[in-house]
Structure formats: C-alpha cells, structure tokens
Image (cartoon, grey):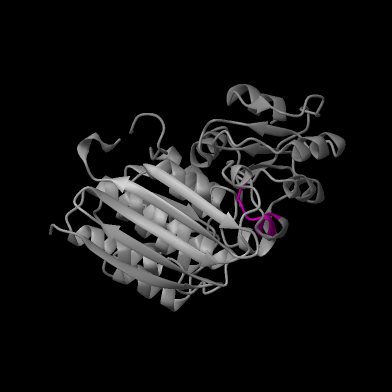
Amino acid sequence: MTGNSDGVFFLTGKDFANAGSASSNLKGILEKRGIPAEIIRRASIAAFEAEMNVIIYAVAGMMHYTITPETIKVVLQDMGPGIPDIGLAMQEGYSTAPDYIREMGFGSGMGLPNIKRNADKLTINSVVGEGTTVEFVISLERSGR
Amino acid sequence: MKLFELVESLSLDVKTPGADLTREVTGGYVSDLLSDVIGHAPEGAVWVTLQAHLNIVAVASLKGLAGIILANNRVPEEGTLKKASEMNVPVMTSGLPAFELVGRLYALGLRCR
Amino acid sequence: MTLDDIKGILGALALTGRGDMEIDIGRAYCADLMSDVLAFSVTNSLLITGLTNAQVVRTAEVADIKAIVFVQNKRPDIQTIAMAEAKNIPLFVTELSMFDTCGRLYERGLRSQMGPTV
C-alpha cells in the first residue's frame, strides 16, 4: 500500500480494560502497509507508552496518526494535569505515578524515555492544568536512523 | 551462603558502603511488585528487582530480606540509598537483566519455594 | 528451546489452545514493569511475569514477544486470555515462583538478551 493514510483513536482516562487497543490497531494498520517489522515494533512501543500515559494521567485524549511513504507521525493530545517539568519527566526512573499504577506494571518512569528511544523525533508540549501533546515521528526512509 | 560471596561471584556493585555483607542468604526472590514481595518473599532471601524507589528499603527491612539487587543497571534514587544505610539494608546493582541474575543465583544453589 | 520444552520444565499449564508448541524460544525476560519489558526485551522471546492484567498481553503484542508465562499460579481473566488467543500469543501458568521459573529455564540453557545463545 502506498500514498498517505491517517486516522484517529479516542482514549478514555482510567479505561484500563481497553488501554493499548489504539496502539494495537495502529500496529495492524502498519502491518497492512508492509512496513518492516523492526520499524513497526518501534512505532507500536512508542504509541503504547504514550497511550498508557493518557490512560493513567488524563481524563481523555486522542491519538492521531499520519502515515506517508516517508514517515509515521503520531500525535497524542490529552486533557490532563500537564507536566510541570518536562526535563525531569524525561529522566529514566522519574515518576509521579501513584502506587496502584506501579502495581499494574506502569509508572516506573520509563515511559517518555521509551518513546524517545524508539522515535526519530519527539516533541512534547504541556500546559499544567490543561493538558499535554506528545508528537513523535519515525522515519521510513533508509537513511532515517 | 554469605552475601559477600554473592557480591564476589556475580561482580555486584555495592551501593551501601558499610552495610553488613556477612549476613546469611537463605534464598532468592524476584519481583517488581511491592505488594507481592510483602506477601510472599521469604525471610533471608536476596531480592532482585527493577524498582529503584524509596519504598523498596522499607519492604526489605519489614520482610527481613538479606539485601536488594537492582537489575539492568538501574540507579537507586538518592533517598533510597540514604534510607538503606540508615536501616542497614544492603543495596547492590548489576548490569545484568533480572532473568540472568536469577539464573546465576539459582546456579549457586539459591531457591524460592 | 521450544514452548513444549518450557511447558515441561516448568510443569506449566497452557491457558490458550491454538498456539504452535514447536515455536523456538531463544531468549527470556522477566519483569513486572511493562516499560522495562518495552525498553529491554527482544523480539521472539518469552516473558515471565507475575502480573496478569490485559496490558501484559498488549505489551507482548507491541514488543513482538512470542509467549508469556505467569508465575505463582496467577491467572489472567477470561477476557485477557481471549485477547491473547486472538493475537496468537500463547499463555502459560506455573505454580513455581518467578525465581525458580527463571532459574530452571536458565539451568536448561535459556538466556536473556545478553550473552551468546546456548
């Protein structure tokens, strides 16, 4: 499949039963386009971490994806508490997650670092009390990484 | 087996200088869930985990564990080491993944039944 | 090491029915923190965990993990098992502790992402 495609998934805060389904759907879409497995894995992992952040911290949000022959771009926009110090949040191991989230296997402070590790470009914009936008891009061109 | 013997054979990095490494290790435990460790870890076990935050020290102390080994080169938070020293809970780190660490501890004869 | 070998070594029970038991598993990773699995696990590996929620199966799916062993006789709910079945991720449960599960598999030659394959 060639050309561009895009779409959006809606996310509900604390909906742990469906947490991850948007990333799972995105993975299926990438597979249908015949994108190499290692790139799909990176995109899926980054999307899943970003999706979990919305589910854990925000009231609601959406995941918008755009796939072109050159890139996969994923934007997660949420209505949530915002991130007061993005630099701190990017540090491995830094987390503000409550204990019940840690007991679910998340909130160990590896989420944003994991997105960064897998993406070619990561942009985070956040306003405390309003919400956060996480945008990452993964290149599909051979010279991309 | 003494804790210092584990430190030597697995080349662990001891992060709590002055901690008592002569204590006897009678078993092993691996978990990243504090509630699970509180519920199930046997006294005298050495605990392998990825959790680096402060509460691990209190849990280890509460359960009478022989020490904590952080896997994957996880860096303990500053507060974690301070509290560990105060409570005399040895904290060690290793670059090995938890699976490998446990495999080697098992090969040394430690079990968790 | 095949899934069938692993099932035997652990005395494990298969929770899913359709998977191919002859799949070769080259690596194993144990954790209860899914972000660590996402950061450090490798493809085509076995995940050993004490967590049984739906996110564990999601994590395996996005990280291309081949199969999951739940320790201490912990079982996921029926929806989670159904999801794994649909995604073709075999699930197993063993009565062993996570420590002995890792130890036994290591003893039989399974390794994590580091070091040579045995």
Residue at image coords 57%, 56% = A126
Which corner quadrant of the image does residue A56 belong to? bottom right
Residue A121 image point, x, y percent = 39, 43
Q: Residue B42 in magenta?
A: no
Residue C45 seen from this side: no
Q: Residue furthest left?
A: A1
Which corner quadrant of the image does residue C85 belong to? bottom left
Q: Residue furthest right?
A: B86
- What is the number of callouts on the image? 0
Residue at image coords 41%, 62% = C58
Residue B107 image point, x, y percent = 52, 34
The magenta segment is B29-37
Q: Is A54 left, or right, of B91 in this rendering?
A: left
Residue A59 image point, x, y percent = 57, 72
Residue at image coords 38%, 45% = A119
Residue C42 image point, x, y percent = 37, 43
Observer-nearest residue: B47 or A113?
A: A113
Q: Taking A38 as reference, is A56 above or below it?
A: below
Observer-nearest residue: C56 or B102?
A: C56
Residue A111 seen from this side: yes
Q: Is A24 left, or right, of B46 in this rendering?
A: left
Observer-nearest residue: B1 or C17?
A: C17
Q: Which quadrant would the C terminus of chain A be assigned to in this image? A: top left
Which corner quadrant of the image does residue C39 belong to? top left
Q: Which quadrant would the N terminus of chain A be assigned to in this image? A: bottom left
